[in-house]
Image (tube, grey):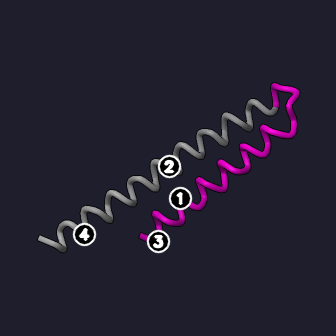
Amino acid sequence: MKKKEEHRLQRAEVHAAMSIAGVAAALSTIASENSKNETNEDREPAIASAAALVAAQCAKVAEAM
């Protein structure tokens, strides 16, 4: 029973990491598109870069699990 619970927890962690990676990738895309359309050139690329970094890290964590 304990091993089954550990496996379920691991699957949940992978799912959470992939979900966060998806959200971060979407935010990165939105920020990147907004930076092309708006005059605030400093903030939007930074947000896009940070979101891309979060997405990459979450994907690495999920892959490692």
Q: CA distance from mark 1 to mark 4?
A: 20 Å
Q: What amino acid is found at the position of numbered circle 3 in the picture? A: Ala
Mark 4: few/some/many CA within 10 Å (<14, 14-19, 20+): few
Residue at horizontal 32 percent and vertical 61 percent from the top? 11
The region drawn magenta spans 36-65
Q: What amino acid is found at the position of numbered circle 1 in the picture? A: Cys
Q: CA distance from mark 4 to mark 2?
A: 21 Å
- Residue at image mark 3: 64
User: Dot 4 lies on which element?
Assistant: helix
Precedes in sequence: disc 1 or disc 4: 4
Precedes in sequence: disc 2 or disc 1: 2
Q: Is residue 59 inside the magenta stretch? A: yes
- Residue at image mark 1: 58
Does residue 49 sit above or below 36 in this rendering?
Answer: below
Mark 1: few/some/many CA within 10 Å (<14, 14-19, 20+): many
Mark 2: few/some/many CA within 10 Å (<14, 14-19, 20+): some
Residue at horizontal 32 percent and vertical 65 percent from the top? 10
Precedes in sequence: disc 4 or disc 2: 4
- Residue at image mark 2: 20
Q: What amino acid is found at the position of numbered circle 4 in the picture? A: Glu
Q: CA distance from mark 2 to mark 3?
A: 15 Å
Residue at horizontal 58 percent and vertical 46 percent from the top? 24
Quadrant (top left, top right, bottom left, bottom right) of the N terminus: bottom left
- Residue at image mark 4: 6
